[in-house]
Image (cartoon, grey):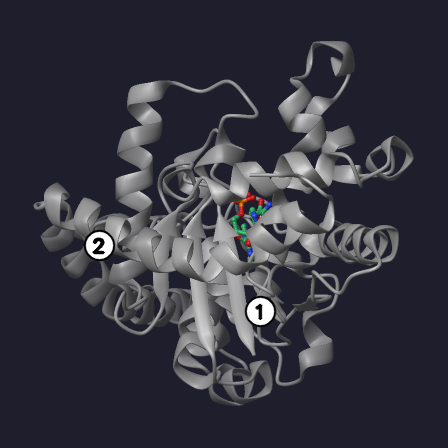
Amino acid sequence: MRTLSGIQPTGNLHLGNYLGAIRNWVRMQDDMPGEKLYFLADLHAITVHNDPAELTANTREMAAALMAAGIDPEKAILFNQARVPAHAELAWLLFCTARIGWLNRMTQFKEKSGKNREGASVGLYAYPVLQAADVLLYQTTHVPVGDDQKQHLELARDIATKFNLDTGTETFTLPDPTIPPTAARIMSLRDGNAKMSKSDPSDMSRINLVDAPDTIMAKIRKARTDAEPLPSEVAGLQDRPEAKNLVSIYAAMADESIHDVLSRFAGQGFGSFKPALGELLVETLRPIATRLNQLKADPAAIDAALEAGAARAAALARPTLDAAYSALGLCR
Ligand code: ADP
Ligand code: TRP
């Protein structure tokens, strides 16, 4: 068994990233047998406009944030993609297996390129093939991702199947996406129908992992709600997206079911629920923020951890990369 996942180092982690992705990585790190590999997808980050100094800073910041959130470089292999050239090498080989027709169906490219398709980078178009390389390079069996990445994982399976068939080998293992049932989808604090995202122009729409306690309390206090008290049943949250979101955040943070949260707060208004939620967030996030600030004070230590992780990853990648070159008849 081998578990792998990646995240683009695009700056500040928010509560959506934490509850939807990172917390599951930490749980799988602790619960799954076999190697766990977690990486910062810096090669993916340059598929769109990129400021070099910012990328360097964000890569370190995200690595520190992952460690602060519980990724332990002793238990999991933590690295950034650019430090393991095998990712880019295998991607080239897989470009020749993947079909243009397959990439034309990728919905994320359509969304990200928008109306300016002709002006998008070739890298943005080829992005899912690099992602397939990330996964296939390590004979990965389990890939914890959000629902939006399912299509890319299907593509990785198609590429692996075709490569194995074309070369008459069993070079690659077919990976399975693991979309944990506990992966919470967190919505914006300003609009219960929009997902919490770092690209939302309003900082009031999200809780950042580094927000100060006062900021967290203020953001929750100002979060959009309705005027009704909380219902006693889950069904009572239907058509109340903002109320549902706040209750879901509470449940996810406290590791309780929505049902349990409602049975405690049923009949109460947001005047009492919001302070309870704010305090829960402050207390749960405080150790992460504290640890993040400690880690950030020593960038050399972050780099050393990433470098050590990259060396371990490169060693694991080697046999598969060699097998892929050789399956294609490439002499090295
Ligand atoms: P953003 O939307 O802030 O740009 P990304 O697209 O970079 O975030 O996502 C990074 C990871 O965090 C992905 O695994 C994604 O599924 C998860 N994620 C992002 N936003 C949310 C959210 N609001 N709720 C749950 N998971 C999220
Ligand atoms: N595309 C993923 C995202 O945007 C990040 C990613 C890159 C990834 N390579 C991966 C996720 C390999 C899982 C496996 O969230």
In what quadrant of the picture does the C terminus appear? top right
Answer with mark 2 or mark 1, whichever residue precedes in sequence.
1
- Side (left or right) of 47 relative to 206: right
Q: Is residue 217 left or right of residue 93?
A: left
| x, y percent for residue 136 | 63, 56
Say left or right for 272 vs 307. Answer: right
Left or right position of 103 against 123: right
Residue for point 57% across, 81% down: 258
Estimate the spatial distance between the alpha carbons at disc 2 and disc 1, rounded to whole Å. Answer: 27 Å
Mark number, residue 183: 1
Dot 2: element: helix
Return the x and y of residue 330 as percentages of the image width and height: 67, 39
Please, which residue is most extreme toward the front here? 331
Using the rendered view, name the quadrant where residue 274 is placed. Answer: bottom left
Label 1 crowd (10 A; few <14 / some 14-19 / many >=20): many
Residue 200 screen position, x and y as percent = 51, 34
Instruction: Report the mark closest to the observer, 2 or 1.
Output: 2
- State the mark number for residue 305: 2
Q: Residues within 10 Å of mark 2 (few under 14, many from 20)?
A: many
List the single residue furthest toward the right: 101
